[in-house]
Each structure stands twice: as C-alpha cells, then as structure tokens.
Image (cartoon, rainbow, N blue to C red):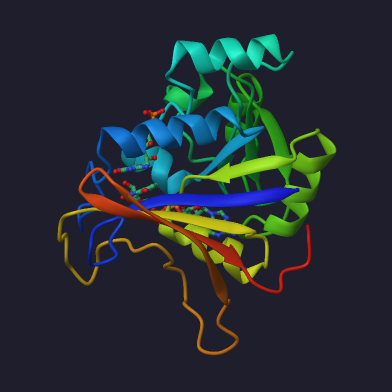
C-alpha cells in the first residue's frame, strides 16, 4: 500500500478558518493537479470532520481522466473512504451517492442504528474501540484491493496517520493567503508530537498558481 497525503494550506499553515468552513486556497492549476492525483488513486480518504465541514464529493472531475480509468478497466471514480468513529456521516452526504464505492470506517462504539443506515449506502469497516484503529482499517482496505490511497484531510486525520506511521508521501500546496487563528485547523492537529517527529525528505518543489507545491517523502517508514 502507498499512502499520499495531499492538502492545501495558507502561507501560515492553516487548512481552513476557525469557523472550519472551506477556504479555496488552491488555484485552478492546483485543483487540476488534485484531480489527476485522484484519478491515479484507488481510493480517496477523508475524516468525518471534513465531510461535515465541506460535504466533498471526492470524484474525478475531468471527463477525459474518468474515461482513461474506464479504458484501463477501473471504475470511473476511485473509491471513497470516510474515517468516522461513531457513524456521524450524514445520510445525504455527497460521498454516499452512487458515483463510487464508499467505505465508512467505524469503531465498535458506533450505534447500531447509524451502522444499519450507513450499511445501505456504503461498505462498513469496523476497527478500534473509541477512535478508528487506522492500521487495522487500512489493512482491511488493502484486502479489498485498494493499494494507492490519497488522503485529502483534515488535520486531525492527517496527524493520526503520521502518528501511525502510515504516510509515505506528503504533497502540500502553500497558497497566497493568511488565514490565522489559533483555533483554525492546521495540516497536522491532534495532540501533536513532542519527540520522534516524523522526518521528511524534500522530493520536489514547483511554482503553481500564485503559490508553491511541496512534495515530501516520509523518511524511514517501512512500506505498509
Ligand atoms: N485545505 C485543505 O486541503 C483541506 C482538506 C481537507 C479538509 N480541510 C478542512 O479541515 C477541516 C476538517 O478537519 P478536521 O481536523 O476537523 O477533521 P478530519 O477530517 O481530520 O476528521 C477528524 C474526525 O475523524 C474521526 N476519526 C476517527 N478516527 C480517527 C483517528 N484515528 N484519527 C483522527 N480522527 C479520527 C473523528 O471523529 C475526528 O473528529 C475543515 O475545516 C475542512 O475545511 C481542508
Ligand atoms: N486541494 C484543496 N485545495 C483547497 O484549497 C481546499 N480548500 C481543499 N479542500 C479539500 C476539501 O475536502 C474539498 O472539500 C474537496 O477538495 C472538495 O472535493 P469535491 O470538489 O467536492 O470533489 N483541497
């Protein structure tokens, strides 16, 4: 399995404002790049915080890219994965429509009612007691044939994935704006590290739109 985390941050490292509402940080060229990255992935992964904040669809937007996937014998869109401990994904969320297969990763503590409702619209993966056990959940996704995973946030999930040693690559578009705010989500939130900080190796730098795309490899990670 290969896991790429992709995100856009303001120049001061924020993913969105303190209202947790989506901010368009990327310009057209970066959104096109994200679309290509989706098209090259077996699944696009987000945390339920992102579903609740942005209601993303997580599909490939370019008709030609969807056609290429079909020509290669793949579904037009990659699968979608929501990491959602207690089943808070709204039943009318865009990720639960029929544009692609969707997996919702839950824990043992997810109420039966939510479980039954979500099971009508998604494949359920149960791993962990209180929070989703990401190692187990990702192993289950790999068993379903999902090898190339792209994670689109948010900050809580991205931190947990680094903490679990699951990230192979990080792509960050740093855009031309300041969002600020101590309570605004950043690239990696959660509890934060105090030691054993994950080390990154810079793989590539590119000027894009009015910002910069940074690609990092995560050092010393065993292949998952
Ligand atoms: N700029 C970008 O590229 C970008 C991308 C995605 C999201 N965002 C923004 O990020 C914000 C949402 O991020 P967030 O951090 O609130 O939510 P998130 O998407 O990271 O989801 C976190 C939630 O996932 C669930 N979860 C279950 N198991 C977990 C685990 N092991 N580790 C972590 N979470 C687990 C928990 O309910 C947790 O609250 C929104 O404001 C959204 O607009 C920005
Ligand atoms: N790459 C990127 N640049 C941004 O400036 C930004 N705000 C996001 N945010 C990610 C978020 O989850 C979005 O909601 C989905 O990118 C929307 O996906 P859809 O178009 O609905 O498929 N992502």
* Ligand number 2: quarter of image: top left
Q: Where is residue 99? Give x, y as percent.
A: 54, 14
> 19 or 73, which is in the foreground?
73
Q: Residue at x 48, y 24 (%)?
A: 59
Q: Is residue 61 left or right of residue 158?
A: left
Residue closest to the eye, 125 or 11: 11
Q: Can residue 55 be seen from the camera position used here?
A: no
Horizontal and vertical percent position of residue 131: 61, 59
- In the picture, residue 87 is in which quadrant? top right
**Identity of the residue furthest to the bottom in this view:** 195
The residue that appears at 52% across and 36% down in the rendered structure is 37
Above-or-below relation of 58 to 48: above
Position of the C terminus, as image quadrant, is: bottom right
Residue 17 appears left or right of 163: left
Residue 43, given in percent of the width and then of the height, sits at 63, 34
In the image: residue 85, left or right of residue 21: right
- Please, is residue 194 above or below residue 222 in the view? below
* Point 44% across, 36% down: residue: 34
């Amino acid at each position: 399995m290969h896991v790429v985390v992709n995100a856009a941050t303001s120049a001061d490292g924020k993913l969105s404002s303190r209202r947790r509402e989506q901010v368009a940080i990327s310009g057209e060229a970066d959104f096109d790049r994200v679309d290509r990255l989706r098209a090259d992935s077996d699944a696009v992964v987000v945390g339920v915080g992102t579903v609740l904040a942005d209601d993303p669809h997580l599909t490939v937007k370019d008709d030609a890219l969807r056609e290429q996937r079909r020509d290669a014998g793949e579904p037009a869109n990659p699968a979608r994965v929501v990491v959602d401990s207690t089943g808070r994904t709204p039943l009318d969320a865009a990720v639960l429509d029929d544009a692609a297969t969707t997996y919702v990763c839950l824990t043992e503590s997810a109420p039966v009612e939510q479980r039954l409702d979500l099971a009508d619209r998604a494949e359920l993966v149960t791993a962990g007691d209180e929070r989703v056990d990401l190692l187990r959940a990702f192993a289950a996704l790999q068993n379903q044939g999902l090898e190339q995973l792209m994670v689109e946030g948010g900050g809580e999930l991205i931190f947990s994935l680094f903490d679990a040693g699951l990230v192979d690559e990080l792509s960050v578009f740093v855009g031309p704006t300041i969002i600020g705010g101590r309570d605004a989500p950043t690239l990696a939130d959660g509890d934060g590290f105090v030691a054993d900080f994950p080390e990154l190796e810079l793989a590539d730098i590119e000027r894009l739109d009015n910002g910069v795309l940074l690609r990092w490899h995560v050092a010393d990670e065993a292949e998952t």
